[in-house]
Amino acid sequence: MTMITGGELLVRTLIRANVTNIFGLHGAHLETIFQSCRDHKIPITDTRHEVAAGHAAEGYARATRGLGVAMVTAGPGFTNVITSMANAYLDRTPVLYLSGSAGLRDAETNTLQAGIDQVAIATPITKWAHRITVAQEIPRLVAEAIRLATSGPTGPVLLDLPSDVLVTLVDDTSVAIPERVLLDPSSAPAPQSSAIDEAVKLLAGASRPVLMAGAGAYMSGVSQQELREFVEAAGVPVFSDFQAHGLLPSNHPLYGGTFHKMADLAAPDQRPDVILALGVRFGLFTLGMSDLLVPSAAKIIHVEIDPKEIGRLRQVAVPIVADPRETLRALSAQAKSHRWPDRKKWQQTVRDAKTEHCKRLQKDTERSAPPIHPLQAVSAIVENIPGDTIIVGDGAEAYHWMNEVIRQNHPGGYITHGFLGAVGFGLGLALGAQVAHPKRPVLCLVGDGAIGFTITEFDTMVRHGLPIVALVMNNHSWAASQHFQEVVSGPGKLIGTELRDANYHEVAAAFGCHAQRVAEIKDLGPAIRAAFASGKPACINVSIDVAPIPPEVLLLMKR
Ligand SMILES: Cc1ncc(C[n+]2csc(CCOP(=O)(O)OP(=O)(O)O)c2C)c(N)n1
C-alpha cells in the first residue's frame, strides 16, 4: 500500500487515457499535478499566458484528431483560458481543461485566487463542467470527462480541482484506475439503410451533385482513401471547410476548393442541385441563410452526428443523424454496386470555375514593385514551404488570403478560424500542432494585430525547441476592421483600426528566434526557406499592402 496524492491519481488516469502531453502554466494550486507529471515524465509545455496553453491544447487536438489537455491555475489562470474554451466549444474540439481552485475548506473566506465559481462560468462553454470534491473519485470523473470530450459530437470539458482535494493522500490500492478510458469511436450509430438508399438514389439522379466535407468528417476519422473511392465511383466534386481541407488532396481533379469557391458556380446551369453535406455545420462558412454558396433549391443530404445541426438553416431532403465516417462507409458499400451517370461535363464545369477564379485573382495582383500584394505573399508561402507543412492561419484577412492558394495533400494540415473568430490564437495553436508533430514543419500565418496577443510565446518556442516559423503579414492595420469601416462607414472615417509599422521580428529575436524583415517579394521565398533551414523558431516580418480586400471578405460583406 502506498499513499498517493489526488494529483497523482489524476496523472495516472491521464496516462491510462494515452495522454502524452499537457499544456499549462504553473500555480501553487496545481503543484501535485506538476510533480506527478515530472515523476511520470509527462512533458508539460509551459506557456507564457494561459490562453496560449488552451489554444495549444486545441491545436494538438486538431492536428491529431485526439484529445488535448490544458492545465491552468485558480482564478486568473482560469479566466485567462476562457477564450480558448469558448473557441473549442464552438469548434467542437475535444479538450480537457483542468483548473486549480481554492481548497473546499476555504470556501467563502476571501482567500487567494478564489471567490468566482469557475464551474458556473465554464458551464455554457463546455460539454460538461464539474468540480471534483472527493479525491477517491478523481479516476472515475477524469475518465468520464475524457469520454464526453472525445465522443461525437466532440467538445471541451472542464474539471475543477480544489487544492485540498489534489493534496489529499489516498491509499493507491483502494482506488481503481478505469481500464478503458477511451471509447471506440466506430461505435457510432449505423445509419438507417433506407436513408442510405434514398441518399444514393438522390445523388445518382442529380445533374450537378457536390459533396461538402465539413469538420465533422475530419473529426470522425474519414480517411482520404474512403472519401476518394466514394467520390470517384459516384463522380461527385468535393468542396471542404478548413478542417476537412486535404481530405481530398488539393490537386485531385474532383477537388473544387473551400466552401467559398461554390460561389463561383453562379450561373443557373452551374448551380449544384444535390448536396451531400458530410459533417457540415451550416452557418458562417456556408454564408448563413444566403444562397450564394448553397442554392436554396438544392436538395440536401445532411449527415451529422448532432441532430441539433440538421435543418438548422436549411430544409433537409435526407437527414442522417450518424457518424460521418460510418455513413460514408455505408454509402460506399452501395455505391460500388450502383451504376453512376457520366459526369464529365459537370466535373469540367467545376474545374473551369476554379481556373477562372485563379486567373481573375492573378490578374488583379500582378506587380513587381513594393508594397507586396497579400496574395503574392501567401503564394510565396505555399511555393516555398517544405512538403507536408502544417499551416496555422490567424489574423483575419491574412487567413482569407491563404484560403485562396492553400494546397494540402493530407487532412489536419490547415488549422484556422472557426465560428468564434478569435484573432490572436495562432501562436498557441501552432505550439500544439508542433508538439503533436515534432518532425513536421509548422508555419503560423498571422496578422500584425493578431501577433500582439501572445507575442511572448516566441519564448515558449525557444525554451521547448519548437521550430515554428511565424510569418507576420504587416500592413500596419487591423485590416479586416479597417476595411469594414471603409466599406460600411465610408472613406476617411477610420478610428481605432490603424497600427504602427512595428519590428515584431526583433521581439522574436530578443527571445532567441531566427528573425528577418522582408519588404520586397523577391526576398520572401529565400527568407521562408532560410527560416525553416535555421532549425529554430523564427519570425518573418513582411511588409504588405493594406489596400486589397480578399474575395472571401467581399463575399461575407455581400451577405
Ligand atoms: C480577440 C478578437 N478581438 C477582436 C476581434 C475583431 N476583429 C476581427 S478581424 C480584426 C482585425 C485583425 O487584424 P490583423 O490581426 O492585423 O489581421 P489582418 O486582418 O490585417 O489580416 C479584428 C480586430 C476578433 N475577431 N477577435
Image (tube, rainbow, N blue to C red):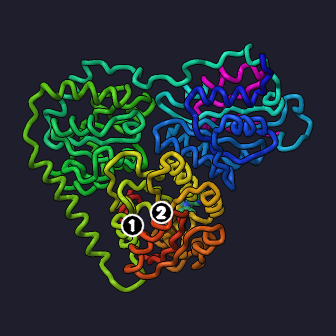
Residue 518 image position (x, y, % from top left): 47, 78
- Quadrant of res 321: top left
As drawn, 84 above or below 521: above
Residue that numbered label 2 is attached to: 445
Viewer-proximal residue among 271 and 150: 150
**Residue extent of the magenta highlight:** 115-143
Q: Which residue is mark 1?
A: 381
The spot of residue 466 in percent (x, y) is: 56, 56
Asked if one can make out residue 340 in the rendered structure from this viewpoint, the answer is yes
Q: Position of residue 420 (x, y in %)?
A: 53, 49
Please state the quadrant of the image where ligand 1 appears.
bottom right
Q: Residue furthest top?
A: 174
Please give the count of numbered marks on the rendered protein.
Answer: 2
In the picture, residue 463 is in which quadrant? bottom right
At 24% across and 27% down in the image, what residue appears?
Answer: 331
- Look at the image and say whether residue 522 sits in the magenta stretch: no
Image location (x, y in percent) of residue 284: 43, 49
Q: Earlier in the sequence, mark 1 or mark 2?
A: 1
Q: CA distance from mark 1 to mark 2?
A: 9 Å
Count residues near mark 1 (Cα–Cα under 10 Å), then give few for <14, some for 14-19, many for 20+: many
Q: Quadrant of residue 365?
A: bottom left
Return the residue nearer the eye: 218 or 440. Answer: 440
> Disc 1 vs disc 2: Cβ atoms closer than 8 Å?
yes
Q: Quadrant of the C terminus?
A: bottom left
**Mark 1 is on which residue type?**
Ile
Instruction: Indicate whether 36 appears above or below 260.
Output: above
Asked whether residue 132 is drawn in magenta, I would say yes
Dot 1 lies on which element? Answer: helix
